Amino acid sequence: MSAFDLAEAIIRYPLILKSLLAICNIAGRAIERDLSIKNVDTYNPRLGEDQARIIAGYIKPFLPDYVEIPSLTQIDKIAFIDKEIRKSKGRWEKLVVESLNKYGKTSYKKRKFKVGEDEFELDAATPEAGEINAGIDIKRIEARRDIHKRCDEIVNKAAKLNSICPKSKFGVVVYYPFIDEHVNIQSRLRSDYIDGVVFASEAKDSVENAVRLLLSILEASA
């Protein structure tokens, strides 16, 4: 199949675009970055003929010579499940930040800070500009094997923030589904640079209760 034939297939059956990109290991953001085609919904694309031809020419070299239809549909299914998982994570983090802004006495937003040549990101911090008074790391740990790595990342970030803002406070909101093992995470996160650690499930009430507890610990409640 030539790139022109591939473009015609995408125009006639736009729903195949996502699975084609997935089999090439190309994310939708690469289309915007490399081809300057913005706001492409890869699950429901609305492409002009010229755009379809440009995309077809871009992905053609990455496509295998042959692929079974069942394999293609399975790849599409896995990509969709992965997208839904990432969407759920994003909603949970957003809910935590909304709760911080609802119950905190100051406003919180995502912020970055630099220590030497290294740059770090806080999922929520206050104030929105200037020296950071409080930083919050919002972390989903969904597998037991990830505990050590994720906890080490959090402790390191807290230490780095303290090195440039020694008066700042640092809190952590954790989602970890194995409730009986929360004590293990608390132990791993025991540090002079971390002021409070709370746990929340995906439920809104759980998130709000955890955030209110953390704000109380940080003496930052409204």
Image: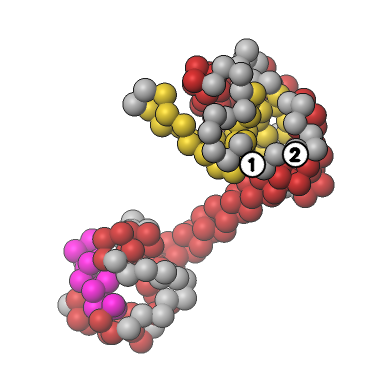
Residue position marked by numbered label 2 in the rendering? 104
Is 149 placed left or right of 177 in the picture?
left
Residue 55 sits inside the magenta stretch: yes
Please state which amino acid type lies under the numbered disc 1. Answer: Tyr
Can see residue 20? no
The x and y percentages for residue 35 are 26, 66
* Disc on res. 203: none
Kindly state the secondary structure of the residue where label 2 is placed. Answer: loop
* Disc on res. 108: 1
Residues under numbered marks 1 and 2 in contact, where contact means CB atoms less than 8 Å apart: yes
Dominant SS of magenta comes to helix
Write down the quadrant of residue 155 in the picture.
top right
Point 22% across, 67% down: residue: 58
Can see residue 84? yes
The x and y percentages for residue 146 are 54, 31
Is 212 drawn above or below residue 102 in the view shown?
Answer: above
Which residue is more in the foreground, 111 or 198? 111
Residue at the far front: name it: 130
- Magenta region, residue range: 51-62
Which residue is more in the foreground, 100 or 86? 100
Badge 1 local density, few (<14 within 10 Å), some, or many (20+)? many
Is 48 drawn above or below residue 21 in the view shown?
Answer: below
